[in-house]
Image (cartoon, rainbow, N blue to C red):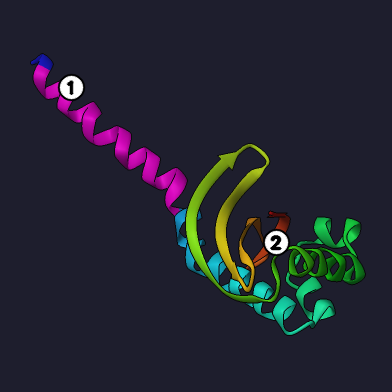
Amino acid sequence: MQPVRSFGVFLLVPALLCLSGCGVAKGLKPAQATSVKFLTKLQAKRFADAHQLCSGKCQAVVTPEQLENYWELVQKNRGQVTSWTHEGTHFQMGTGGSSITLVYRLKCEKGESAVQFTLVQEGDQWLIQRFDFRG
């Protein structure tokens, strides 16, 4: 009887994990779309439009002018950003809500840089809560 009970637990655990985490995984494509839009707006120097892709908390502490300063610093150090590729994803779930972290490699005229976005769901949209440009 013990093997049957163990097998039942073996099936139950993945099902529970999926019920709790599949909702976050469904947000991956919309989160990626928001990240790409954000980078596209920065590249086009449409900083106010990029700012609209940030969560309420992010908008409260980061202005469009600060977005411009961050982007200009990347370009000063590495040259114009020519393209980017998605390199990694991390899902986080907790009592405060769920988030998706996406890492992109930026190809620039003078080398490479990276940016990490953490996105949260507000209403039916995934918005940028936090970003970190590196290099």
Residue 30 point in image, percent of width and height: 54, 69
Q: Of circles 2 and 1, which is in front?
A: 2
- Disc 2 packing (10 Å; few <14; some 14–19; many ≥20): many
> What secondary structure do most residues of the magenta stretch adopt?
helix
Res. 74 image quadrant? bottom right
User: Which residue is more in the foreground, 112 or 16?
Assistant: 112
Q: Which residue is under mark 2?
A: 128
Question: Given the image, on which type of amino acid does mark 1 rest?
Answer: Ser
Residue 17 horizontal side relative to residue 132, left or right: left
Does label 2 or label 1 sit earlier along the sequence? Answer: 1
Q: Residue at x 22, y 30 (%)?
A: 10
Residue 79 point in image, percent of width and height: 71, 72
Res. 97 image quadrant? top right
User: Which residue is more in the foreground, 112 or 53?
Assistant: 112
Mark 1 and mark 2 in contact (Cβ < 8 Å)? no
Residue 1 point in image, percent of width and height: 8, 16
